[in-house]
Amino acid sequence: MSLKVVTLGSGVCANMCLPGPRRYPPGFLVDLDGQLLLMDVSEGARFRLEDVGYDYGLVTCAAISHVHPDHADLATFLQAKLCRALWGPPVEGVDKLDVYMHEISIDGFKQSWMWRHPEAADKMNHFPEKFNFELQPMRGGWEKEVLPGLKLKAFGVYHGFGQHPALGFRIETKGATIVYTGDAGITESLFANVERADLLIADCGTRIGQEYTAGYGHMGPGQCGMLAYRSQVKELWLTHYIGFDTPAAMEAEARKSGFTGTVKVVTDGLTWEKK
Ligand SMILES: [Zn+2]
Ligand SMILES: [Zn+2]
């Protein structure tokens, strides 16, 4: 078994606010023996997949944590998949995409897809003999083996003042467990869903000392560290941070909880692997 997680985007919804390397909006590729699952489909995901050596056409499964624009630029990815299927070589997997998202968000996406294609508004798939996508509804507590040997579990998280239907993902394979919080404030229910993960990818959208402002629904590095420590995680990735705090300060803050595992302040391209 070979399981890999590749960071396509560790950034946020704006750039040029601070110096530092370019970080694209959220996206993580999970590669289990060549089967590809994309967690969050943000701007330009197809280019970033190519940049790390993958054919975006071969992604057959996408899970969207929530539909804020920095996480869900789905229409452009679907169009790219469709045109890749129409124009590119007919490789296995190029003709389909299963898109998992919160059940409450599905109707809105259907409307926006039709808004973009009034000429074909009577059908979701415009060239069904070449390419088909399916919108698969999820909710907290939902689980399914979405790829052979890969179970995807969704759990509800607190985000957007608790008013946005948002999910975190727990991925279980034979060899390892990976958890991605999506955008999430700290809540008691998070701990059980994160428990004993080999890798925890945690939303660190709130800066040090401002966790009290996290009513919107993001965590600070101290909260991410506490989550990792109490849930006995092996490796913690801090992602989706704006960049006001230095990586060293973020790591130190995360360790205040007593967490002694690996901590990484994520930059694009960072990869985790288990063979
Ligand atoms: Zn969000
Ligand atoms: Zn976000």
Image (cartoon, helix red, strand yellow):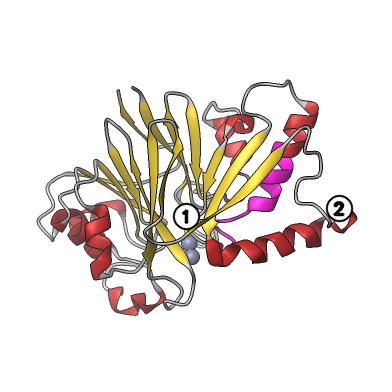
Q: Can you tell me whether the CB of the residue at mark 1 lies under 8 Å from the nearest atom of ligand 2?
A: no
Q: Which of the 4 image quarters holds residue 83?
A: top right
* Residue 57 tag number: none
Q: Is residue 75 visible?
A: yes
Is residue 129 toward the left or the right of residue 108 in the image? right
Classify the position of the N terminus by image quarter: top left
Residue 239 point in image, percent of width and height: 38, 53
Q: Name the residue under label 2.
A: 120
Q: In this view, does 75 lie above or below 198?
A: below
Residue at coordinates 9% horizontally, 56% vertically from top-left?
258
Instruction: Name the residue type under label 1.
Output: Pro
Q: Tell me where the magenta segment starts and ends, as one range.
A: 67-81
* Residue 19 tag number: 1
Q: Can residue 242 be seen in this view?
A: no
Residue at coordinates 63% horizontally, 23% vertically from top-left?
92
Classify the position of the C terminus by image quarter: top left
Residue count near mark 1 (Cα–Cα under 10 Å), binned few <14, some 14–19, many ≥20 = few
Q: Is residue 9 above or below residue 90?
A: below
Inspect the magenta stretch and tell me whether residue 138 lies in it. Answer: no
Residue 151 point in image, percent of width and height: 38, 41
Residue 109 point in image, percent of width and height: 66, 61
Front residue (pair 49, 18):
49
Inspect the magenta stretch and tell me whether residue 69 lies in it. Answer: yes
Mark pair 2, 1: CA separation: 44 Å
Is residue 29 toward the left or the right of residue 2 in the image? right
**SS class, disc 1:** loop
Specify the farthest residue to the right: 119
**SS class, disc 2:** helix
